[in-house]
Image (cartoon, rainbow, N blue to C red):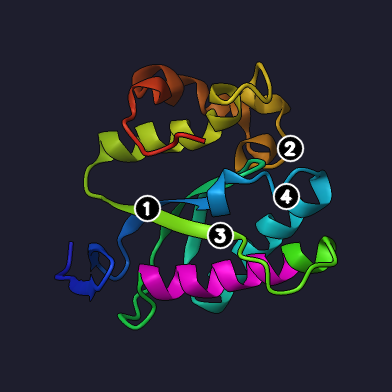
Amino acid sequence: MEPGFFYNYKHAPTHLFVPSATYMLTAGTYKKDRFFDIAKKKNAVSKCLHNVSKEMNWKIIAWVVLDNHYHTLLTASENGNNSVAAFVKKLHRRISINTNRLDNIKGRCVMENYWDKCITFEKSYWARLNYINNNPVKHGYVESAADYPFGSYYYSQKEDWATFEKQYPWDTVNEKDDF
């Protein structure tokens, strides 16, 4: 892994950004309100994630959108200026604008905060990938992740995941996810 950049913030912990590294990113809505309560809004969040990733040269590995939060696993841009904070700022701005437009509201705060984790070893990568895939199960949306249409797992070759799901269990991952 190449050297990274430390970003210091006044009201948040220091963040390490390593270009081309893989990150798990989790973000919640303001006060955990269920702003993404219908399919149209979840699809809009997904579209924002995909568009911003493409614009900033990040690669999405996995993603899921629920009523009041999302998780994604991404590979960062090689460009040191495209830090996690810069990525999230652009993404959350777009999500807020689109959500407010769909609700016919102006200026409402939609996204509250985010957490990121730089993935540094394979076991962590696979466990977090499975965690993202199975997050709708964890939160009681569906009994099987394969039935949840607002995440990458729904569109993947599910039979390819069976071995990894057993080898790297998702329910042992310790991530901030109290939604």
Task: Choose top left, top right, bottom left or bottom right for residue 123.
Answer: top left
Q: Which residue is mark 2?
A: 149
Query: Mark 2, mark 1: which one is toward the viewer?
Result: 1
User: Relative to 8, is 57 on the left or the right?
Assistant: right
Q: How many marks?
A: 4
In the rendered image, the quadrant that contains the N terminus is bottom left
Q: From the viewer's perspective, is residue 144 above or below residue 67? A: above
Q: Which mark is residue 35?
A: none
The Cα–Cα distance between marks 2 and 1, rounded to whole angstroms, is 24 Å
- Residue 97 inside the magenta-drawn segment: yes
- Where is mark 4, residue-wise? 42
Q: Are marks 4 and 2 in contact (CB under 8 Å)?
A: no
Three-letter code for the amino acid on which mark 4 is drawn: Lys
Give the CA separation, mark 3 to mark 2.
Answer: 22 Å
Which portion, as a residue range, is magenta?
84-98
Q: Nearer the viewer, residue 123 or 5?
A: 5
Residue at image mark 1: 115
Query: Which badge, 4 or 3, is on the more N-terminal residue?
Result: 4
Label 1, label 3: how many angstroms apart (C-alpha)? 12 Å
Kindly identify the residue that appears in the image at 70 percent across and 50 percent down.
Answer: 35
Q: CA distance from mark 1 to mark 4?
A: 20 Å
Q: Amino acid at mark 2?
A: Pro
| For marks 2 and 1 on the same chain, the one whose residue lies earlier in the sequence | 1
Q: Earlier in the sequence, mark 3 or mark 2?
A: 3
Query: 10 Å neighbourhood of mark 4: few (<14), some, or many (≥20)?
Result: many
Residue assigned mark 3: 111
The residue sitting at 54% across, 28% down in the picture is: 134
Amino acid type shown at disc 1? Trp
Q: Is residue 134 left or right of residue 2?
A: right
Between 41 and 169, the one nearer to me in the picture:
41
Q: What residue lies at 85% left-to-right and 66% top-to-bottom?
A: 104
Q: Residues within 10 Å of mark 2 (few under 14, many from 20)?
A: some
